[in-house]
């Protein structure tokens, strides 16, 4: 099955700085790579996703890059704000299933 | 608003006492998922339905069962909860699986005494 590794497990950044989270996956059949944000006591919410035929995608302050050859993908958050503080999960999957990384707790210091 | 609803949000049960968690959706999605998320861990897929077709993960304990009586509702039954089953249980839906977004509900926090 798919195995997704996510680093770092915790990340503290100064407000206004950038945050980068990296994930690797094992199954070359995976073709869908979403990123979820989970706030305390809530379910995960999709913030951005990328498919295997695309190398990079951007949505305002959030961008994701995918390197299928190396089997890794990354989340970039620019100009971080206090409301970006949360747990972020990467995931990889195909067909109907997603495998999640262990999560990154991001803290944005004011 | 179209959404995924989970009830109850918090459930307390006793060791060995059966419990049922419910999920409903107004999105009319074909696929529904149940995940278990323990503290500070990633969501772990237990099983999913594509329409009425049930798909169990190989490592999901027999203690966990599911029912999907119609498109809108899906239930998670834990037949004999153990202390290790205390977790957040997340329901998610997807239009037709594949490379499609999964929409998550708010989760049910299960406590086993």
Image (tube, helix red, strand yellow):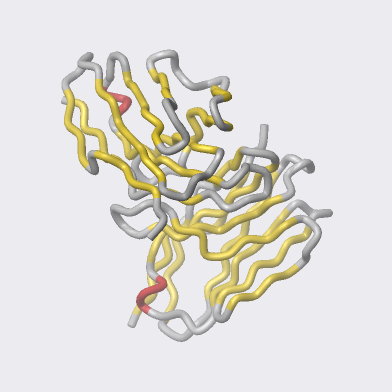
* Relative to A24, B93 lies left or right: left
* Relative to B108, A44 lies left or right: right
- Among the 4 quarters of the image, the one containing residue B83: top left
Residue at point 51%, 54% (across, down): A89
A20 up-or-down from A9: above or below: below
Foreground of the two, B76 or B81:
B76
B28 up-or-down from B66: above or below: below
Q: Quadrant of the N terminus of chain A?
A: top right
Task: State the residue lying farthest toward the right.
Answer: A69
B75 up-or-down from B30: above or below: above
Foreground of the two, A107 or A60:
A60
Residue at point 40%, 53% (across, down): B3
Q: Position of residue A48 (x, y in %)?
A: 58, 64
Figure disc tally: 0
Q: Quadrant of the C terminus of chain A?
A: bottom left
Q: Position of residue A94 (x, y in %)?
A: 70, 42
Q: Position of residue A62 (x, y in %)?
A: 57, 74
* Relative to A69, A80 lies left or right: left
- Among the 4 quarters of the image, the one containing residue B89: top left
- Among the 4 quarters of the image, the one containing residue A73: bottom right
Residue at point 67%, 51% (across, down): A24
Residue at point 46%, 80% (across, down): A80
């Amino acid at each position: 099955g798919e195995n997704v590794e996510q680093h770092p497990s915790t990340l503290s950044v100064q407000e206004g700085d950038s945050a980068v989270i990296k994930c690797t996956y094992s199954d070359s059949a995976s073709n869908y790579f979403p990123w979820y944000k989970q706030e305390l006591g809530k379910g995960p919410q999709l913030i951005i996703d990328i498919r295997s035929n695309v190398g990079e995608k951007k949505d305002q302050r959030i961008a994701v890059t995918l390197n299928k050859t190396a089997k890794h993908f990354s989340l970039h958050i620019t100009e971080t704000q206090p409301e970006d503080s949360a747990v972020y999960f990467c995931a990889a999957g195909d067909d109907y299933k997603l495998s999640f990384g262990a999560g990154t707790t991001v803290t944005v210091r004011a | 608003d179209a959404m995924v609803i989970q009830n109850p949000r918090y459930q307390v049960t006793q060791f060995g006492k059966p419990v049922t968690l419910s999920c409903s959706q107004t999105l009319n999605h074909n696929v529904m998922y149940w995940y278990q998320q323990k503290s500070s861990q990633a969501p772990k897929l237990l099983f999913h339905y594509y329409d009425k077709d049930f798909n169990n993960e190989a490592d999901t304990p027999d203690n966990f069962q599911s029912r999907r009586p119609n498109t809108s509702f899906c239930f998670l039954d834990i037949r004999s909860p153990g202390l290790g089953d205390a977790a957040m249980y997340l329901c998610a839906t997807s239009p037709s699986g594949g490379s499609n977004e999964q929409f998550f509900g708010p989760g049910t926090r299960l406590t086993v005494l």
